[in-house]
Amino acid sequence: MSSLLLDVQGVSKYFGGLQANEDVSFQVNKGEIVSIIGPNGAGKSTLFSCITGFHRLDKGQVFFKGQDITNRKPHAIGKLGVVRTFQIAQVISDMTVLENVMTGGFLKHSRVPEVRKRAGEVLSFTGLFEKRHRNALSLSISDKKRLEVSMALAMEPELLMLDESMAGLTPVELREMIELIRKVRQRGVTVVVVEHVMEAVMELSDRVVVLNSGRKIVEGPPKEVVANPEVIRAYLGERYHAARQ
Ligand SMILES: Nc1ncnc2c1ncn2[C@@H]1O[C@H](COP(=O)(O)OP(=O)(O)OP(=O)(O)O)[C@@H](O)[C@H]1O
Ligand SMILES: [Mg+2]
């Protein structure tokens, strides 16, 4: 039986006259990987920000494990177990890889030796342990993406929300990131991704939610969603179909 983890109900967010999210509802069950796709400007990152407390909603409610988390602070939502990454790696600081991951660890733990030990474990899991003493800003794009995931994992989330973790990766790096996300799920973490890389969406997702102009237009299993005429018209177009041939 599936158990409901995240319940997003009728979320609307306006920037002046712009409807960035309009009455968006969707649910995520424990253990799932759900993808959110849609054209540039569809409102995907805004929805992440609304769920995780980085934006105040104008309408709607967000529940995590039955608890109303609407408009709570990101820190409080993180402590409850909902952690996101950002599309633009804005959280990585001019410190070592290990120190960056440690900043995540302080969300749930306060003793430095314990936080350092846990951060090392996370880096072993994500494959960055050998680079733990490198300056984080010197990492490749791929390793920066991996570091962001590591920092998020150090916060010990139950629900991990990844905003475009696969953008700009080579095919080999893409395979590695897909494998890492699978491993994260095997650990019992539920995952929501915002993603344009359809190969990853098709391989990873149990369910796909499609946004267009702030609204949810379609939701379903990946194969059904990519064959949906409305999704092809609004987003995939010839791009995806050409790529499949
Ligand atoms: N802080 C903000 N202030 C004003 N407008 C914003 C703000 N953030 C986003 N928007 C606008 O809201 C709309 C949705 O943006 P959002 O970043 O959520 O889209 P997205 O689906 O994540 O797009 P992309 O695929 O390009 O990342 C866009 O029109 C964007 O310009
Ligand atoms: Mg975005």
Image: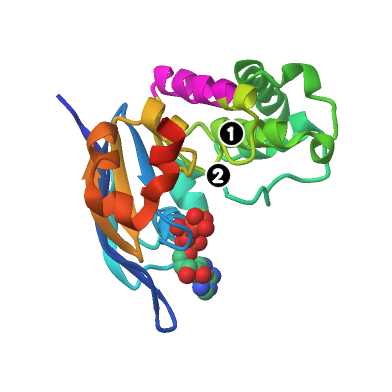
The answer to whether marks 1 and 2 mark residues whose Cβ atoms lie closer than 8 Å is yes
Residue 132 inside the magenta-drawn segment: no
Q: Quadrant of residue 56?
A: bottom left
Q: Residue furthest bottom?
A: 17
The disc at residue 149 is: 1
List x then y, in percent, for residue 180: 53, 22
Q: Secondary structure at mark 2?
A: loop
> Could you tell whether 31 is left or right of 126 in the image?
left
> Could you tell whether 46 is left or right of 137 in the image?
left
Stretch in magenta = 175-188
Q: Is mark 1 within 8 Å of ligand 2?
A: no
Residue 9 visible in this rendered orientation of the protein: no
Front-lying residue, 145 or 49 = 145
Mark 2 crowdedness (10 Å alpha carbons): few <14, some 14-19, many ≥20:
many
> Could you tell whether 63 is left or right of 78 in the image?
left
73 lies above or below 30: below
Q: Amino acid at mark 2?
A: Thr
